[in-house]
Image (cartoon, rainbow, N blue to C red):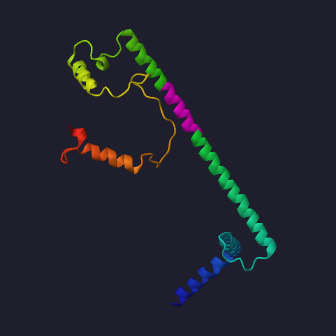
């Protein structure tokens, strides 16, 4: 048992004598830890002050500096947000121009196709005696009260985008729904 105690003491003391640098590194690590801890607490205090908390210990000069910093940060945020919105708007305008050009190209191709066939679209005029043309011609006679546009099949694009805004007032809605349900059972669009 005595030999075991001697071995334990030898191991313990020899490790202390061999590694005096370990003690120094522990002390430097502890100092580094304390510096980081103080910095962390300082940053937390500063964050609370930015949120409007713990302002009592600040003097007038520190409060003015805090206010200036908040103002400059808000200006930066607004500037970044505005630039982002302008970039998005520019992208959307480019897409709109692209779609308008594609629409115009398709419209020109369709008009050329109708011009090549000389009589225009057979399905619209009911020509060539096909059943679709006759059926459409009969249906067209029933709806003669709708005027034809100068552009033929196409309608102009309304590019005024109004999200969440409905221009139909309530009297127009009730008039259109009451006209649809004529006999009370089947809506008018199903007849």
- On the image, the x and y values in percent for residue 105 come to 47, 21
Q: Nearer the viewer, residue 69 or 47?
A: 69
Q: Please state the extent of the stretch shown in magenta in the rendering.
A: 90-102
Q: Residue, x 55% and y 88% (percent of image)?
A: 5
Identify the residue at horizontal 60%, vertical 46% (top origin).
85
Please identify the quadrant where the C terminus is shown: top left
Front residue of 129 and 12: 129
133 versus 13 height, above or below? above
Question: Viewed as shown, does residue 91 lie left or right of 178?
Answer: right
Quarter occupied by residue 44: bottom right
What secondary structure is the stretch in magenta mostly built from?
Answer: helix
Q: Is residue 96 magenta?
A: yes
Residue at 30% x, 17% y is 125
Image height check: is 103 above or below 162? above
Left or right: 2 in relation to 172: right
**In front of the other: 25 or 93:** 93
Q: Is residue 2 left or right of residue 20?
A: left
Instruction: Give the image location of residue 75, x and y in percent.
Output: 70, 56
Q: Tell me what residue is drawn at x 47 percent, y 48 percent.
A: 165
Is 188 situated left or right of 56 in this image? left
User: Percent position (x, y) of residue 70?
Assistant: 71, 63
Please tell me whether residue 58 is drawn above or below residue 1 in the rendered image. Answer: above
- Residue 119 figure quarter: top left
């Amino acid at each position: 048992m005595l030999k075991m105690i001697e071995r334990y003491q030898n191991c313990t003391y020899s490790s202390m004598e061999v590694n005096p640098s370990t003690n120094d590194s522990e002390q430097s690590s502890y100092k580094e830890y304390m510096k980081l801890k103080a910095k962390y607490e300082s940053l937390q205090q500063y964050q609370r002050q930015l949120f409007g908390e713990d302002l009592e210990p600040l003097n007038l000069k520190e409060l003015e500096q805090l206010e200036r910093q908040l103002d400059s940060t808000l200006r930066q945020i607004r500037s970044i947000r505005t630039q982002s919105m302008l970039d998005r708007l520019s992208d959307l305008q480019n897409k709109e121009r692209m779609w308008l050009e594609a629409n115009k190209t398709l419209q020109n191709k369709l008009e050329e196709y109708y011009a090549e066939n000389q009589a225009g679209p057979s399905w619209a005029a009911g020509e060539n005696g096909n059943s679709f043309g006759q059926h459409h011609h009969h249906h067209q006679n029933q709806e003669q009260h709708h005027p034809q546009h100068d552009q033929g099949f196409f309608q102009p694009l309304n590019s005024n985008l109004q999200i969440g805004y409905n221009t139909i007032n309530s009297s127009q809605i009730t008039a259109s729904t009451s006209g649809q349900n004529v006999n009370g059972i089947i809506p008018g669009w199903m007849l």
